[in-house]
C-alpha cells in the first residue's frame, strides 16, 4: 500500500516527520500523529493479529474503534485498538497472538 | 467544575458545545478518536450546485469557533459509563470520572455489518473504514476493490475512493439472507437508490427513475437489469449479482459471486471468482446509542430513523434531567442536520442552566425551525421516510413527556 500524496480536492499531503516504531520485531516508519492501523497499512501490513482461539488472521474492520478487531499489544499493554492509537517514537507494537485454550483441549481429549 | 460535558467531537457535539459556550457555560468535549471533527473529517462530495462540501474544512471552522469560546476539547478519551448521582452526571472515562450537571450525548452512528463467509480476512473492511483510511489518514486501502452492498453511503464513498485514485472494480449485493435483509433484495435496493436518482451519475438510473418509481415497471426493470450492470461513475453496479464468500488465506484475494434472479435468489452454477485485494462491506448506518442506554434513557425502535433511538424532544431533551442528545444518535441524517441539532441542544442546555433570559425561547424556536428547513433543503436523505420517523418521535414525546401533558395529568390526579 502507499500513501495518497496528491489529491484533487484535499490537496497535497503535507510533509510530516517520520517516526520509527517496531511491529513484531521489524522496524518501520510512521508519520507523526498517525494511527497504528494507518502506519501499518501504509507499510503494506494488513494482518494485525490472529484470532485468540482459532488462529485465523484479522485486520482492521471499522477503523473507528467500534469493532475491536484491530487489537494489538503496545509497549506490553495488550488489547490496544490500532485504529485509535497514535504511533509514538520507538513504540514497540506486537500483533495479537493465539492463546492456549486449555478447557477446549481438555474437552477434545475426552 | 465544568457545566457541560459533550460526548463526541463531531458536527453535533461541536455545534452543541459552541452554542452552550456562547452563553458563558464552561464546556468540555471528549472524543475517542485521535482528532476532533467526527465523521465530518472524512466527508467530501460535490453539492448539486457544483460546490465541494469538504468535511475537513467544516470541522476546522467549528473547531476554531469552539476554541474562541474556550471550549476544552480532549481527544483519545473513551467513555465507558454514564450515571447520575443526585444532581450531577458522572461520565466515567479512561482518564477518570468527569462530572457536570449537563451532558450532551452526540456519539453519532456506526455501520451495520453484513457478515458473510470470509468477512474476517484482513483487507475486508466497512465502507466507512475505507473512507477514514482514504480521506483522513491518506493511506490507500488497496489497488482493486469490490463493494458489497449498494446504498447511498456506498456511492458517496465510492466517489471518494475514485477521487483518491483507488480502483473499485464492481459493486455487488450481499447474498439474500436474514442477516442481509433488504440489502440482498434487488428490487428493494433499486427502490432506495431511485430516491437519490436525481443525483445518480448514471444516465440510465437518472432517466429510468421517472418510470421505475412505478411498482410494475420496477419489477420488469429488475428482470431485464443488464447482466454487466449499469455504470456508476465508471464502476459497474451489479444488482443481479450477489457475493457468496470472500476468499483468501492470509488476506483478501477475491470474492465468489453468483448471478441472481430478479428476487435475489442465487442461480445455481453461475458462480465466478472476481479478484480483489480489498473488499468494503456497506450495510448502512445505525444510531450509536449505547451510552444513552447505560444512562437509563428510555428508547424507541423507529426504523425510519435507523433503529433504536433514545426518546427525545425537538429541543433535544431526553426524559432524564440534564441529559441531552443530538446528531445521528437521534436518527441517521447528514452532518448539516447534526450541526443544526447540536446548536438546538446547546441553546436548550443554556435555557436549563437559566441563561439567555427571555430571548432564549425565540432563539430556540428559530433553531428548531432551522433543523426542519435544513432537512427540507437536503438533496439526499439516508432514509427517505425520515420525516415520518421524526413525526413519530415528536408525537411520542408529546404524549409521554411534554410538560403540558404532565401538568394536565397532575391536575386530573389532584
Image (cartoon, rainbow, N blue to C red):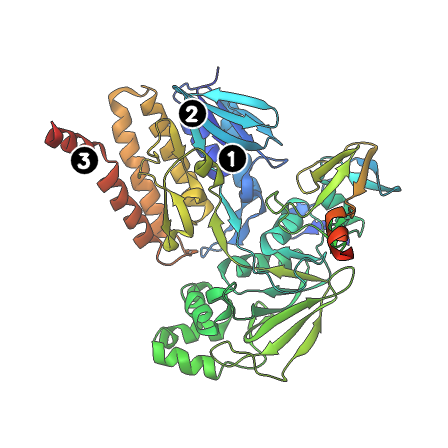
* B137 versus B17 height, above or below: below
Q: Nearer the viewer, residue A9 or B373?
A: B373
How many other residues sit within 10 Å of disc 1, few (<14), some (14-19) or many (≥20)?
Answer: many
- Point out the frontmost of discs 3 and 2: 2
Q: Is residue B119 left or right of residue B157?
A: right
* Quarter where residue A30 is shown: top right
Q: Distance between the residues labelled 2 and 1?
A: 19 Å
Mark 2 or mark 1, earlier in chain: 1
User: Residue A92 placed where, x, y %?
Assistant: 82, 35
Q: In this view, does B350 lie to the left or right of A52?
A: left
Residue B84 — which label? 2
For disc 3, the marked residue is B405
User: Residue B125 placed where, x, y %?
Assistant: 64, 55
* Quarter where residue B408 is shown: top left
Host chain of mark 1: B
Q: Can residue B37 be seen in this view?
A: yes
Host chain of mark 3: B
How many other residues sit within 10 Å of disc 3, few (<14), some (14-19) or many (≥20)?
Answer: some
Tag 3 secondary structure: helix
Q: Distance between the residues labelled 3 and 1?
A: 32 Å
Amino acid at each position: 500500500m502507499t500513501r495518497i500524496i496528491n489529491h484533487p480536492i484535499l490537496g497535497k499531503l503535507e510533509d510530516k516527520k517520520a517516526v520509527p516504531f517496531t511491529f513484531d520485531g521489524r522496524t518501520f516508519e510512521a508519520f507523526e500523529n498517525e494511527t497504528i492501523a494507518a502506519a501499518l497499512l501504509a507499510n503494506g501490513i494488513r494482518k494485525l493479529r490472529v484470532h485468540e482461539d482459532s488462529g485465523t488472521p484479522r485486520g482492521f474492520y471499522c477503523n473507528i474503534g467500534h469493532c475491536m478487531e484491530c487489537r494489538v499489544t503496545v509497549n506490553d499493554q495488550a488489547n490496544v485498538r490500532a485504529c485509535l492509537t497514535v504511533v509514538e517514537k520507538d513504540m514497540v507494537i506486537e500483533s495479537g497472538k493465539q492463546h492456549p485454550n486449555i478447557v477446549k483441549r481438555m474437552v477434545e481429549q475426552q | 467544575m465544568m457545566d457541560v460535558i459533550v460526548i463526541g467531537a463531531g458536527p453535533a457535539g461541536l455545534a452543541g458545545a459552541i452554542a452552550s459556550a456562547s452563553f458563558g457555560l464552561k464546556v468540555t468535549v471528549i472524543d475517542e478518536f485521535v482528532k476532533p471533527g467526527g465523521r465530518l473529517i472524512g466527508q467530501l462530495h460535490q453539492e448539486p450546485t457544483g460546490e465541494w462540501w469538504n468535511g475537513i474544512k467544516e470541522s476546522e471552522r467549528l473547531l476554531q469557533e469552539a476554541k474562541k469560546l474556550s471550549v476544552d476539547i480532549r481527544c483519545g478519551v473513551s467513555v465507558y459509563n454514564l450515571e447520575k448521582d443526585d444532581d450531577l452526571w458522572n461520565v466515567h472515562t479512561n482518564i477518570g470520572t468527569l462530572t457536570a450537571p449537563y451532558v450532551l450525548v452526540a456519539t453519532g452512528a456506526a455501520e451495520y455489518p453484513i457478515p458473510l463467509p470470509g468477512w474476517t480476512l484482513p483487507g475486508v473492511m466497512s465502507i466507512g473504514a475505507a473512507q477514514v483510511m482514504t480521506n483522513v489518514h491518506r493511506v490507500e486501502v488497496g489497488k482493486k476493490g469490490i463493494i458489497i452492498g449498494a446504498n447511498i453511503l456506498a456511492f458517496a464513498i465510492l466517489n471518494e475512493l475514485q477521487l483518491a485514485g483507488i480502483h473499485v472494480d464492481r459493486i455487488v449485493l450481499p447474498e439474500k439472507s436474514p442477516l442481509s435483509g433488504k440489502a440482498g433484495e434487488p428490487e428493494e435496493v433499486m427502490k432506495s437508490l431511485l430516491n437519490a436518482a436525481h443525483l445518480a451519475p448514471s444516465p440510465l438510473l437518472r432517466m429510468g427513475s421517472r418510470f421505475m418509481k412505478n411498482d410494475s415497471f420496477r419489477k420488469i426493470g429488475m428482470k431485464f437489469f443488464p447482466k454487466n450492470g449499469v455504470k456508476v461513475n465508471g464502476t459497474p453496479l451489479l444488482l443481479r449479482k450477489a457475493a457468496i464468500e470472500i476468499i483468501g488465506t492470509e488476506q483478501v484475494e477475491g470474492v465468489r459471486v453468483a448471478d441472481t434472479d430478479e428476487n435475489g435468489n442465487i442461480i445455481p452454477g453461475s458462480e465466478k471468482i472476481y479478484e480483489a485485494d480489498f473488499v468494503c462491506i456497506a450495510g448502512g448506518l445505525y444510531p450509536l446509542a449505547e451510552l444513552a442506554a447505560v444512562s437509563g434513557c428510555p428508547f424507541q425502535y423507529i426504523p425510519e430513523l435507523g433503529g433504536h433511538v433514545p426518546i427525545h424532544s425537538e429541543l433535544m431533551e431526553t426524559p432524564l434531567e440534564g441529559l441531552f442528545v443530538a446528531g445521528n444518535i437521534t436518527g441517521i441524517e447528514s452532518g448539516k442536520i447534526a450541526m443544526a441539532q447540536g446548536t438546538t441542544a446547546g441553546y436548550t442546555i443554556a435555557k436549563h442552566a437559566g441563561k439567555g433570559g427571555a430571548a432564549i425561547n425565540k432563539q430556540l424556536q428559530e433553531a428548531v425551525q432551522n433543523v426542519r428547513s435544513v432537512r427540507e433543503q437536503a438533496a439526499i436523505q439516508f432514509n427517505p421516510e425520515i420525516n415520518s420517523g421524526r413525526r413519530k418521535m415528536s408525537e411520542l414525546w408529546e404524549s409521554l413527556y411534554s410538560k403540558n401533558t404532565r401538568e394536565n395529568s397532575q391536575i386530573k390526579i389532584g
